[in-house]
Amino acid sequence: RFGSRLGDGALGLLKASLGDESMGIRLATIQGLADLGDYSAFDLIEDIASQPASEESVAAAAELARLGRDKGERLLVEALSDERPVIRKSVMLMLERGKVAARRKLLMERLSDKSKEVSLLAAHLLRNDRDAREDVIKTLKDIARVDEKLADEANAALANLGDRRAVFGIEARLRAG
């Protein structure tokens, strides 16, 4: 863990890293702050999570949820309503990290998202959920039918789920191409 290995002065080092130009560094820093177990770090994470929806605020909300703070889960659920698909996708990826109790329900709702990219990610995240299988397959078939840009990825996911038509479609496209 990034934060727990820094020793004395870690909070100051991590605070400075929040301004890094690299998104990856900033996201790792938020996780490091949570790992410190320091109350002033928790306050900083809460401040970040409470900012307007961004990848950083979503990551901070997930850390709060992981630490058992209700506010983190509430902020993640609110961010799922953001108009930007990138934020909704970020939330979906963080639901697991935040150990959000309603994860499955929230992902099921995203299967019918207005953005096919968001729906595709939800289908991928639910692919091993037996109870969601029919809905996942229906979503993937819909995406493959209506979104040319995402059709190959949706068909590959269908093939991985054992859909014979998708396998034949992929083979036909490979032979033709």
Image: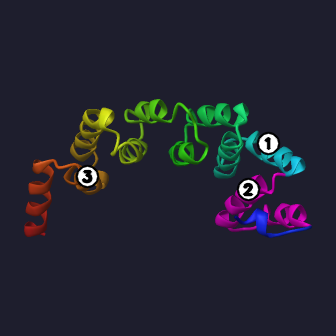
The vertical placement of 64 against 152, above or below, is above
Looking at the rendered structure, which numbered label has been put on residue 30? 2
Q: Earlier in the sequence, mark 1 or mark 3?
A: 1
> Which residues lie in the magenta part?
9-37
Looking at the rendered structure, which numbered label has been put on residue 36? none
Circle 1 is placed at which residue position?
A: 46
Q: Amino acid at mark 3?
A: Ala
| Residue 86 included in the magenta stretch of the image | no
Q: Quadrant of the N terminus?
A: bottom right
Relative image position of residue 94 (x, y in whole percent): 57, 47
The residues tagged by marks 2 and 3 sit, at their Cα atoms, a distance apart of 35 Å
Would you identify the image quadrant in which residue 113 lies? Answer: top left
Along the line of sight, which residue is nearer the eye, 11 or 16?
11
Q: Residues within 10 Å of mark 1 (few under 14, many from 20)?
A: some
Quick check: can you spot residue 87?
Answer: no
Circle 3 is placed at which residue position?
A: 151
The residues tagged by marks 1 and 2 sit, at their Cα atoms, a distance apart of 10 Å
Q: Judging from the image, what secondary structure is the residue with disc 3 in?
A: helix
Q: Quadrant of the C terminus?
A: bottom left
Left or right? Give the position of 51 relative to 9. Answer: left
| Residue 28 included in the magenta stretch of the image | yes
